[in-house]
Amino acid sequence: MRELATTDWLELSLVLLFVVLAAAAVLLVFLRFKRNYWPLKKAPFWFEALQLGAVINAGFFSARLVQIYLLPLFG
């Protein structure tokens, strides 16, 4: 029972970490393309590629969370 609680705590903290990182990445993309503002004026190309990868990963992660947690609730 104690092992299960630890696993649930670790899983929850990992999910929350990914959600916060995904929200930060989406916010940076919004600031970059909608407001024409970029906090790092001379950001290297690899940083923007990493940011785009983070947004794509956040989309896949969100879809996986829906598949795991929400779809079983509706049958």
Image: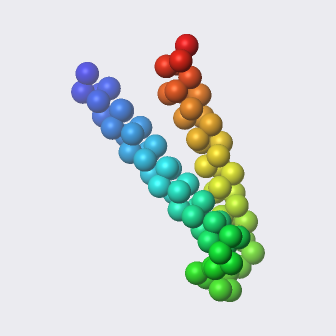
The answer to whether residue 21 is seen in the rendering is: yes
Residue nearest the viewer, comparing 45 with 55 = 55
Residue nearest the viewer, comparing 49 with 25 = 25
Which residue is at a point 33% across and 38% down the rendered structure image?
Answer: 9
Given the current orientation, which residue lies at the most extreme bottom position? Answer: 42
Q: Quadrant of the C terminus?
A: top right
Residue nearest the viewer, comparing 49 with 7 = 49
Q: Residue 33 in the image: x percent, y percent? A: 71, 70
Which residue is at a point 25% across and 21% down the rendered structure image?
Answer: 1
Given the current orientation, which residue lies at the most extreme left position? Answer: 2
Q: Residue 19 in the image: x percent, y percent? A: 49, 50
Given the current orientation, which residue lies at the most extreme front position? Answer: 35
Quadrant position of residue 14: top left
Is 21 placed left or right of 1 in the picture? right
Residue nearest the viewer, comparing 5 with 18 = 18
Q: Residue 73 in the image: x percent, y percent? A: 49, 19
Residue 73, compared with residue 36, is above or below; it is above
Residue 14, compared with residue 38, is above or below; it is above
The way the protein has been coloured in the rendering is rainbow
Quadrant position of residue 7: top left
